[in-house]
C-alpha cells in the first residue's frame, strides 16, 4: 500500500518512468494471462484502498503491521 501511495504522490517523471519500466519487466516475466490478470487485479485493489484512505474511509496499515499479521 505504501508503494502505491508513493507512486500516486510522485511528481518526478524519472521515478514514474522507472516504475513503468518495472511493470513492463514484470509483464514480460509473467508466463500466463491468468497470472497477469491476478497481478493487475491486486494492484487495482491496492489503488482503491489508497484512494479510500485518502478520503478517510479506510485506515491503511503500514508494512510492519502486515508482516506481524503473517
Image: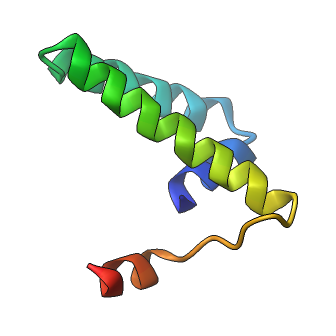
Residue 48 position within the rendered picture, expressed as x and y whole percent measured from the top left:
66, 44
Q: In the shown orientation, is residue 30 left or right of residue 40?
A: left
- Extreme residue in the left direction: 31
The answer to whether residue 11 shows anywhere in this view is yes
Residue 18 position within the rendered picture, expressed as x and y whole percent measured from the top left:
46, 31
**Quarter of the image with the N terminus in it:** bottom right
Residue 26 position within the rendered picture, expressed as x and y whole percent measured from the top left:
27, 26
Which residue shows up at 44% across the image and 84% down it?
65
Q: Image height check: is 43 above or below 68? A: above
Q: In the shown orientation, is residue 37 left or right of residue 61?
A: left
**Quarter of the image with the C terminus in it:** bottom left
**Nearest the eye: 35 or 12:** 35
State how many labels appear. 0
Which residue shows up at 33% across the image and 83% down it?
69
Could you say which quadrant of the image residue 60 lies in? bottom right
Q: Image height check: is 2 above or below 65? A: above
- Extreme residue in the right direction: 55
**Nearest the eye: 51 or 10:** 51
Q: Image height check: is 47 above or below 23? A: below
Amino acid at each position: 500500500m505504501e508503494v502505491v501511495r508513493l507512486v500516486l504522490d510522485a511528481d518526478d517523471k524519472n521515478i514514474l518512468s522507472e516504475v513503468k519500466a518495472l511493470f513492463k519487466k514484470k509483464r514480460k516475466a509473467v508466463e500466463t494471462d491468468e497470472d497477469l490478470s491476478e497481478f493487475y487485479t491486486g494492484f487495482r485493489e491496492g489503488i482503491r484502498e489508497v484512494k479510500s484512505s485518502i478520503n478517510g474511509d479506510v485506515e491503511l496499515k503500514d508494512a510492519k503491521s502486515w508482516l506481524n499479521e503473517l
